[in-house]
Every structure is written in structure tokens, then in C-alpha cells.
């Protein structure tokens, strides 16, 4: 027995020294005399596909109910109950995956990678809230999104954020969206999923850094309403723009605005727009000049941002594992580093040519160079448009829920005396 | 003045309706595009065992506290060796199966006597943490019948698998959910 053992070790050492690591069946499987039968390897199946359809159906139903509650029923309490349900179902029960915010990346990847096809549920998760936004505004944010719900629940002492700060911080969301699209399109990473701050709470488990970011955001949410939705959420950007065009949207008053100013401070998300005052003539002239300058500057800004985005390709392309590997292999081959990494060892064990690896990495970097132009161009365009909208005077006679910023939470309804009159009337009517 | 004002508003409404319809058409177009290459099946994450280098990241990078990756044994490939390099620490002399000589840090690899001189090796999945120590031992010195797989009764199927992002050999793949395992095959006849 012992001798067999030594022979085995001898062969093993031989194998190791010859560097062959992948050869299979060095020892022929035995022929049993006792009638022993091979046990089979168990392969437990993934969750049933049926869940996908249930999720899609629940999403559709929740969006429908949310639209009804926001636009027709006008009840904050009902919206709140639906919001808690969504938090429990999409968040804690379904563990926060799949969500429309992350689905954006799957859609982008499927457009740029022909071999990748999006599953049915993900396509619906991405499209349904957008279609609803086109008709009813941001009803998804109001009561369906679990990430919004968890922040809304902890909002206890709302503090208002000045307008300039709000607009400035929101620019981060545009950059985040552009970056997420860039990394998804190049097949490097799903940035939104990697830094989803609340998914760790839903799973009661997760990466420590993300958990810290999530906790900080939740602490901020106690004072500043929904910081993720307002300043970070990349999908929120899409919803914002589409809800500008929505057919029906939240109105603070069910009737005519009597300009009582009672609702003025009711919105924790700073989404209530006040009636505009006429610009003084001097200001008007200056605004015109500013607008002309900004319109000329817009393309320059776009090109400048695009150029910087493109020239950052050496840094941004490192998000792709192949580029990281190629750089590492280069450093090792050039003798600039002494040690090796798991990745470089794994690559060398495959016996692939370093030349082909470098070529692949350069191709990916070139993609990042091209993508960087779009990334920067988009960010530049958005900054420019923001500056332009500041210089345009818009006529507003009543207190209104901002078309883009309103998260349709329904908090402002009760502040309106007209709403109170309506509620009183509906209460009396059936009797 | 009045009529001019009205006309202006109408033009604005017309433009807005146009943009609205374009957006809806765009979404419909995107939906159509996605439908055209839609797959009926969802995809799940799986490790290609021929690419995996058993680095140990699977044990620590999974979002689950107890990793969804476990070691599996394909018995047809196993050599049923007495001195199993997946089971015992290397250079154990004299070779005995005391706990101090076991390679598995959690004692998840169990050894059962079959007939002289063969032993069956089983993975206790409730103990296995997917560290891949036995996989390394078995692949480098043995038949490679032990290897790591994502166990789908545990996997949450995250949109971006955090182990895949940390995998040094890029062994993680999206595979169709109806064939969710990439088991090693016998390479002898």
C-alpha cells in the first residue's frame, strides 16, 4: 500500500516538474469488484423561470396602481402603503435583483454585444417604467422603486437644498449614467450594480465598502430627501426627461391654484416651482446676451469634454479585465515588477501568445477612446443645456410640481386647501 | 396680439406632442429590437472548470456570507486514490488521515472506504466554503475530478456577479438557465 502511495507521489512530482497542470486522468479510474456504482453529481436547478413572469406582472400591476393612486386617488397614505409593499417585494423578498436601474446596462450591453441577448424580464423592467413616465410621470419613483422606498422611509427631518446646489449635484447623475453606459458598452463592468448602495441591506449581506456607502446615504436621507434618487440615480435621468413630456402628471391642487403658498415648503425634494416674477428689463437684456454666448459655447464645451473623456482612455480602460491583465503582463515581461499575480499566472498557464493579448487590449482601449468622445460629449451637452435653461425665463403663474423633479410621492396634496375641500365633498357625497 | 399668442402655444404643443410621439416610438423601437434577439431563457453564472485556477476568490467575494460556489466531485473521473492530493496535505509522512493532515480547512471533504485500495471522496456542501484548496490539489497532482461550480440552489444570480469581477482567470460565464452547469467530462474513451 505504502509503495503505491510513493509511486503516486513520484508521478505527481514528475507531472508538476514538467509543468503540465491541465492533464486529466493521470490515474485511470478503478474497476471495482464489489459492484460499486458511481454516485451521480447533483445539479440543483436555478430558481424557476416562472419568477421572471411573476416579477414582470407585479411590476406592471404596481405601476398601474401607483399611477391610479397618484393621479386619481391622490392619497399619500395609499402611495405609502404601496411603497412599503414594493420595498418588501422587490427589495427584501426578491433581493433587489433585477431592477430597472441596473437593467439599463443589460440593454446597453445587448446593443453593443451581438452575442448577448436580454432576457424577457429585464427588457420589461427597463421599458415599463419609461413608458409609464411618458404617460403618467415618475410613478415608478413614487411607489415602486425599492431604492427610493428605503430612503423615503427614513426621511424624518427634511432640510431643503438650495437650487444651485441641487442642480450642481445632479450633474453627478449624468456623469454616472454616461460612465455606466461606457463600461457596459465595452463589456468591462456593470458599474451601477457594483455600487448599488442599498442592495446590501436587501440581502442583509454584502461588500463592506458598499455597505459603508449605503449606510452614509441612509444617514443623509434622514435630512436630505432621497439623495440617491436626486443626485446619483442614472435611471432617474431617463425618467426625468421622459416625465417632462408626460401626458398626465401630478398637480398639487385638484382644482385651481389660489396661490395661498401653503404648499410652498411641503416638498422634501425641492420639486415645487413657484410662480415666476417678471424679469426686470435690464436682467432680460443680460439674459439674452448670456443665452447667445452659451449657445456658441455649447459645441465648444462638448468637444472639450469629449476630448478629455477620450484622452482618459488609459485610465478608464483599466476597468476591463483584459486591459488590466495586458498591462500586468507587460510590466512583468519588461522586468518592472518582480512578483506575479493570480491573473498573470492564470494567463501564462493557458499558453496564449502575449502578442494577441496586447492586440486585444489595444482594441479595447481604442473602443474606450471612441466611447470617451461620446461620454464626454454627453456630459458637456448636459452641463451646457443646464446653463442654458438657467438663462431662459419661463412663465409660470401657479405653484406647480416640477415636471422633471417631482417624484410623485404625494406629500403636497394635503397642504392644499382646495384638496381639503375636495376630500370633504367626496366624503359627504355618497351619504 | 391675442391670436399670435394662441398660435405660439399651439406650435409649442405641436412640438411637444411630436417629441412625445418620437420618444414613444423610440421606446417601441428599442422594445422591438430587444424582442428580435430575445432569448426565452434567462442566463445564470457558471464557472468554466477548465479555465478556473482555484485561486480562492470564490470563498470571499460572493455577496452571500456562505459562498454560492461549492466544490463538486465527478465520480467517473476520480481515481479513488488512497493518497488523495485533494484530500491530504502534500508531503504528509507517514500518510495518515488525521485531521491535521487534511487539506480542507472546514473538513468538508469526506473519505469513505469502498474496497481495497479504493476510497470514495464526497463533498459535504453544508461545510464547503468554495476555497478551492482541494481543487488545486486534485487538478495539479490528480485527475481533476474535484472542481468548483456555482450551486444554483444558493446563487442569487446577481446582474453583475461580484466573484466574476474578481476572477483572475475570467472563468465566469453566463450560461443558459436550462443548462446551468459546466461539469467536467471524461477524456478517456
Image: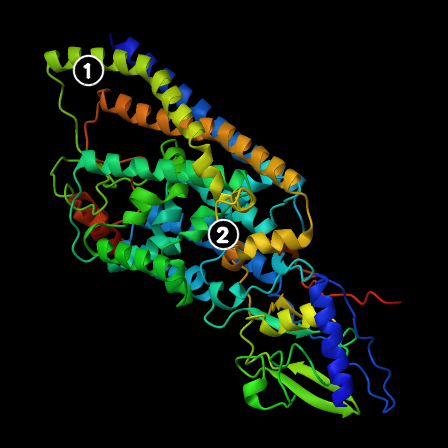
Left or right relative to A344: residue A382: left
Picture quadrant of residue B37: top right
Left or right relative to A91: residue B175: right
User: Measured from the top left, where is residue B21 in percent x and y?
Assistant: 48, 27
User: Measured from the top left, where is residue A245 in percent x and y?
Assistant: 39, 31
Picture quadrant of residue A281: top left
Residue A338, label in figure: 2
Observer able to see residue A407: no
Contact, mark 1 vs mark 2 (Cβ under 8 Å)? no
Quadrant (top left/top right/bottom left/bottom right) for the N terminus of chain B: top left
- Judge depth for marks 1 and 2 and give the one in front: 2
Quadrant (top left/top right/bottom left/bottom right) for the C terminus of chain B: bottom right
* Dot 1 and dot 2 within a common chain: yes
Answer above or below: position of A63 versus A254: below
Label 1: few (<14), some (14–19) or many (≥20) C-alpha neighbours in 10 Å: some
Q: Chain of mark 2?
A: A
Mark 1: secondary structure = helix
User: Going from the N terminus, do you reach mark 1 or mark 2 first?
Assistant: 1
Residue A387, label in figure: none
Q: Disc 1 and disc 2: Cα gap in Å?
A: 61 Å
Identify the residue shown where x is 36% and y is 48%.
A141
Residue position marked by numbered label 1 in the rendering: A287
Amino acid at each position: 500500500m505504502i509503495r503505491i502511495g510513493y509511486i503516486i507521489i513520484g508521478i505527481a512530482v514528475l507531472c508538476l516538474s514538467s509543468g503540465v497542470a491541465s492533464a486529466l486522468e493521470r490515474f485511470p479510474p478503478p474497476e471495482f469488484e464489489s459492484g460499486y456504482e458511481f454516485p451521480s453529481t447533483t445539479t440543483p436547478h436555478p430558481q424557476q423561470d416562472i419568477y421572471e413572469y411573476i416579477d414582470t406582472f407585479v411590476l406592471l400591476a404596481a405601476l398601474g396602481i401607483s399611477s391610479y393612486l397618484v393621479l386619481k386617488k391622490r392619497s399619500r397614505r395609499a402611495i405609502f402603503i404601496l411603497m412599503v409593499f414594493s420595498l418588501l417585494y422587490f427589495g427584501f423578498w426578491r433581493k433587489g435583483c433585477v431592477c430597472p436601474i441596473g437593467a439599463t446596462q443589460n440593454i446597453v450591453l445587448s446593443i453593443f454585444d451581438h452575442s448577448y441577448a436580454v432576457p424577457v424580464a429585464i427588457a420589461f423592467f427597463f421599458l415599463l417604467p419609461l413608458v409609464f413616465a411618458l404617460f403618467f410621470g415618475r410613478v415608478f419613483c413614487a411607489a415602486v422603486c425599492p431604492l427610493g422606498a428605503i430612503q423615503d422611509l427614513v426621511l424624518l427631518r427634511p432640510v431643503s437644498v438650495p437650487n444651485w446646489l441641487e442642480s450642481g449635484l445632479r450633474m453627478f447623475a449624468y456623469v454616472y449614467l454616461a460612465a455606466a453606459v461606457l463600461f457596459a458598452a465595452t463589456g468591462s463592468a456593470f458599474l451601477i450594480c457594483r455600487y448599488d448602495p442599498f442592495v446590501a441591506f436587501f440581502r442583509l449581506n454584502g461588500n463592506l465598502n458598499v455597505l459603508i456607502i449605503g449606510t452614509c446615504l441612509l444617514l443623509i436621507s434622514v435630512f436630505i430627501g432621497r439623495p440617491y434618487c436626486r443626485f446619483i440615480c442614472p435611471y432617474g435621468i431617463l425618467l426625468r426627461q421622459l416625465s417632462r413630456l408626460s401626458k398626465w402628471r401630478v398637480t398639487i391642487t385638484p382644482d385651481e391654484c389660489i396661490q395661498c403658498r401653503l404648499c410652498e415648503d411641503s416638498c422634501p425634494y425641492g420639486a415645487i416651482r413657484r410662480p415666476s416674477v417678471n424679469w426686470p428689463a435690464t436682467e432680460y437684456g443680460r439674459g439674452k446676451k448670456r443665452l447667445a454666448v452659451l449657445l456658441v459655447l455649447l459645441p465648444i464645451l462638448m468637444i472639450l469634454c469629449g476630448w478629455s473623456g477620450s484622452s482618459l482612455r488609459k485610465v478608464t480602460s483599466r476597468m476591463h479585465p483584459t486591459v488590466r491583465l495586458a498591462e500586468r503582463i507587460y510590466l512583468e515581461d519588461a522586468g518592472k515588477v518582480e512578483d506575479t499575480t493570480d491573473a498573470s499566472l492564470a494567463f501564462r498557464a493557458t499558453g496564449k501568445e502575449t502578442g494577441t493579448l496586447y492586440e486585444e487590449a489595444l482594441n479595447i482601449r481604442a473602443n474606450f477612446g471612441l466611447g470617451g468622445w461620446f461620454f464626454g460629449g454627453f456630459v458637456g451637452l448636459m452641463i451646457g443645456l443646464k446653463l442654458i435653461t438657467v438663462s431662459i425665463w419661463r412663465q409660470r403663474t401657479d405653484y406647480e410640481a416640477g415636471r422633471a423633479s417631482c417624484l410623485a410621492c404625494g406629500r403636497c396634496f394635503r397642504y392644499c386647501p382646495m384638496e381639503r375641500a375636495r376630500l370633504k365633498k367626496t366624503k359627504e357625497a355618497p351619504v | 396680439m391675442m391670436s399670435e399668442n394662441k398660435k405660439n402655444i399651439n406650435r409649442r404643443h405641436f412640438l411637444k406632442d411630436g417629441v412625445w410621439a418620437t420618444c414613444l416610438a423610440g421606446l417601441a423601437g428599442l422594445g422591438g429590437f430587444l424582442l428580435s434577439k430575445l432569448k426565452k431563457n434567462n442566463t445564470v453564472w457558471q464557472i468554466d472548470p477548465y479555465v478556473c485556477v482555484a485561486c480562492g476568490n470564490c470563498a470571499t467575494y460572493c455577496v452571500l456570507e456562505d459562498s454560492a460556489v461549492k466544490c463538486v466531485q465527478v465520480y467517473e473521473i476520480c481515481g479513488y486514490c488512497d493518497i488523495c492530493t485533494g484530500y491530504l496535505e502534500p508531503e504528509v509522512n507517514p500518510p495518515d488521515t488525521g485531521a491535521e493532515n487534511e487539506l480542507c480547512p472546514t473538513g468538508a471533504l469526506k473519505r469513505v472506504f469502498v474496497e481495497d485500495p479504493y476510497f470514495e471522496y464526497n463533498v459535504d456542501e453544508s461545510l464547503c466554503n468554495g476555497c478551492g484548496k482541494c481543487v488545486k490539489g486534485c487538478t495539479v497532482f490528480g485527475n481533476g475530478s474535484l472542481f468548483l461550480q456555482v450551486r444554483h440552489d444558493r446563487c442569487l444570480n446577481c446582474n453583475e456577479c461580484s466573484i466574476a469581477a474578481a476572477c483572475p482567470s475570467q472563468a465566469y460565464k453566463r450560461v443558459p438557465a436550462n443548462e446551468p452547469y459546466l461539469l467536467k467530462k471524461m477524456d478517456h474513451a
